[in-house]
Image (cartoon, rainbow, N blue to C red):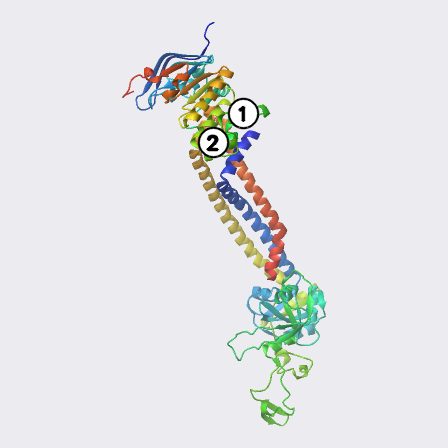
Amino acid sequence: MPVETMVQLSEIEFRYPVGGFALRIPLLEVARGESVAVIGPSGSGKTTLLQLIAGISLPASGTVTTNGTAVNLLDDAARREFRIQNLGLVFQEFELLEYLSVLDNVLLPYRIHPRLTLDSGVRARALALAECVGVSSKLDRKARKLSQGEKQRAAVCRALIAEPRLLLADEPTGNLDPDNKQRVLDILFEQASDSHSTLIVVTHDRDLLDRFERVIDVKEFHADRGKS
Amino acid sequence: MTDILFLAWRYLAHYRVKTAILVTSIALIVFLPVGLNVLVGQSAEQLTARAEATPLLVGAKGSPLELVLSSLYFESDVPDDIPWAELEAIADSGLAQPIPLDARFRARAHPIVGTSLEYFDFRGLRLAEGRRMAVVGECMLGARAAADLAVGVGDAVLSSPESLFDLAGVYPLRMRVVGVFAASHTPDDRVVFVDVKTSWIIQGLGHGHQDLAAAGAAAAVLKQEGNLITANASVVQYNEITPENIDSFHFHGDLGEYPLTGVIAVPRDEKSGVLLMGRFERPEVAAQIVRPATVMTELLDTVFTVRAYVVAAIGFAGVGTLATAALVFLLSLRLREREIETIVKIGGSPMRVAAILVSEIVVVLVLGAAFAGVLAVLASRYGSEAIRLWITS
């Protein structure tokens, strides 16, 4: 049975506007349902790789195909549409809206996109996710009053609420104690497994790498340094 | 739409102090000109109503406005006197019914107005308790004066000395309260009404003292020439008029020269009013006659002009406040840059973000306008009462 590709980056060249730092990716493929860890030193382009896959950043050349769609060839509106329909994103600094409660942050994708309908089923899923990651007792609390670990878990819930086909997580366990690290990874893997989703996780934590099917070191994609 | 409003509301509710300041600022910008118009309009109505109910007013030459404020609202300084003879001249002319006013003294903060019984009918004052004054030394109180002084029928009111340190000045007179008027919601409510003769007694133009011809009064006699007895300083002067001493009260000099602060003239008809005004046009006449309504209209014209400037100033302040609010909003946009980016990264469109931000502005404007509306309703409902209290206080 042929392996279905979820993500394919082909002949990608990406340059930052300043600093002369560039990523050059001849070919990178991630299979549907695969779990991949992305590693590399700080500032090596791990987050950039996730943003290329998500269509948040655009390459200078090459094609980013995610779930069969050439994301970088879409216009802004289509890319946003694509993200909300296909991706779950956990940002490095959580990026919760501090004036919203935990529950409202989790439900945020449903409030900002007209195609998503916020019904009782979604609310029930939000409660279940919060229960799984251990923030069910904090659902009414404002995001700014959460600890770092609680914020991270709430951000994971927000990424999972729309049942994404591809889950991109930028250091989702970075601020968690060992128990909670495992707990968050468990839920990420569980969600990915239940929905046959693909999981790409940026991490510094080498102790967690053996849980992933594949590890990608972004250093191999480094092009020139020093000048653009 | 519901979700957009929800997110806008959550933001505003979270930053409630900032929201409250913005809402209050906008409410004040909207309300101040409206409220000012309402309050000035109501003030003008009330001031004009009393002035229009007083056809003509006679007083000493000088500021017509002071004469009107003194005679109708019992405010302003005491105007120069006119003699009682002016009142008699008006009565003799047959053109108008004169009502004397002598408003120069106070009982604590309340004006003591010497007048005649005709005044009460003219103003339509209705007794709440007691009776009308019948002899000198009695007084009747407006409703507010009775409440403030905490006195009723059977109690006494003391006129205030003009100066504590003026030993030769006016001595307080203790006056018996015989009647209290029902509230009229006019300046009359805070007045202590007395007969004009009682006012003259307070002024020292009339007085009562021990009978110098009686046995035992020799110590108070300075000299006696036939029936003319001159008292020395030890003579006992009465500071209260009682049935026992009322016969000793008397006035010296020519009654025609006795002072009044004003005379309300109620002309028999329009023509009589015009004729009466013509009489005061003569240069040798020492008094002036004014139509209070005309005087108040001139005053209100000035007030309305000032109001226009104030409204313009509020308008400029409003523009400044809105500009500041816009600046606050723009600065907050910079602070919210990351939040906006997050929404877009997740999949929200810039239009959606703009809709949320616009909704926040609209909600603030609507709340501000609603708050201003509440203030305007309160002003229109209670402003009239507040102005009445201010006028009668």
Please tell me in which quadrant of the rendered image residue B243 appears. Answer: bottom right
Q: Residue at x 43, y 22 (%)?
A: A169
Q: Which residue is nearer to you in this view: B88 or B315?
A: B315
Instruction: Look at the picture and state if B222 lies above or below B263.
Output: below
Q: Give the chain letter at badge 2.
A: A
User: What amino acid type should be assigned to the residue bearing mark 2?
Assistant: Leu
Q: Residue at x 57, y 30 (%)?
A: B2
Q: Residue at x 45, y 8 (%)?
A: A3
Outermost top residue: A1
Q: x%, y% of residue B49?
A: 65, 58
Q: Give the chain letter at badge 1.
A: A
Give the label, 2 or 1, closer to the camera: 1
In the displayed structure image, the side of residue B247 where residue A24 appears, left or right:
left
Instruction: Look at the picture and state if B75 lies above or below A170.
Output: below
- Location of mark 2 (residue): A97
Q: Which residue is nearer to you in this view: B237 or B250?
A: B237
Q: Which residue is nearer to you in this view: B160 or A31?
A: A31
Dot 2 or dot 1: first in sequence order is 2
Please tell me in which quadrant of the rendered image residue B115 appears. Answer: bottom right
User: What amino acid type should be assigned to the residue bearing mark 1?
Assistant: Ala
- Location of mark 1 (residue): A128
Mark 1, secondary structure of its residue: helix
In the displayed structure image, the side of residue A24 where residue A73 appears, left or right:
right
